[in-house]
Amino acid sequence: MDQISKAAEIIVSANTVIALTGAGISVESGIPAFRGSQGLWEKYDPMEYAHIESFRRNPQKVWGMLAELYKIVMKAQPNPAHYALAELEKLGKCQAVITQNVDALHQKAGNERIIEFHGTGETLTCMACGKKYEAKNIDFDNPPPLCTCGGILKPDIVFFGEPIPSDALHQSFLLAESADAVIVVGTSAQVYPAASIPETAKSRGAKVIEVNLEPTPLTGRISDVFCQGKASQILPAIVNKVKEKLFGAKY
Ligand code: NAD
């Protein structure tokens, strides 16, 4: 059996399916990933640009990168991979999407149960007074954006050195412990604790389906099925196979 059919078989047989997504699922929406070819880290050193201490020390410099990313993310639209996960949820075959992304593209695609493991870029908080702002109302042309009190705004995303929001952490690991199948899409599986979600699920007996352009530390060790290729092609193909198995017709 080919990898797409194996993945579909696992999803159809499972009672609880969850997805874990990373930056790779949004690459075809025009948002660069961090690692992999053309990843942002080839241009920006993560410890200089994504660590909370760097942000506190030199917000002007970090905002140089953030403003560039925001301008891309604000224009980005979901791609067929995001829509495939939304369709899977409607079919009752995706109980939750746990995403490491901060681009809100799963919401735009129509998924309803989404856990934002690394926070969201949709809102920002003043570092001085705590006032909240919506990204859509911010001018990213002259970073850093400032609060009315003069304080610097920080996106509500989790920087290296910051804790994962406790509710997201708790919900994610509860889901990992109860899932029968995990679909891992476009993550290099190098950022912990997110990368331990499929490991936890696997240790509780879940099957792990991985979709990525290239092998990761999960491949062949944690993943039962590895579908190599673009998420925008692989996920719709898996969903079509799932529908074929559920409803008997060709899609
Ligand atoms: P990563 O950047 O470390 O790795 C991206 C992975 O996606 C790689 O394994 C790469 O091979 C794969 N990939 C690239 N294009 C793909 C495609 N078209 N189809 C399938 N796979 C593809 O991403 P990560 O593991 O998510 O960790 C990076 C951290 O930075 C996360 O917290 C992430 O959310 C954050 N980040 C978010 C965004 C976003 O919100 N879109 C963008 C960049 C980074």
Image (cartoon, grey):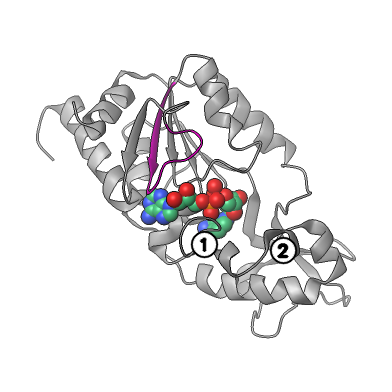
Q: Is residue 202 above or below residue 62?
A: above
Residue holding disc 2: 124
Q: Is residue 216 magenta?
A: yes
Q: How far apart are marks 2 and 1 (CA)?
A: 24 Å
Secondary structure beneath disc 2?
strand
Q: In this view, does 213 lie to the left or right of 125?
A: left
Q: Quadrant of the image for the C terminus? A: top left
Residue 156, given in percent of the width and then of the height, sits at 71, 57
Mark 1 CB within 8 Å of ligand 1:
yes
Position of the N terminus, as image quadrant, is top left
Q: Can residue 25 be seen in this view?
A: no
Find residue 39 and name its label. Answer: 1
| Circle 1 residues within 10 Å: few <14, some 14–19, many ≥20 | some
Considering only order in the chain, which callout, 1 or 2, is on the residue closer to the N terminus?
1
Could you tell me the amino acid type at mark 2? Leu
Q: Three-letter amino acid code at disc 1?
A: Gly
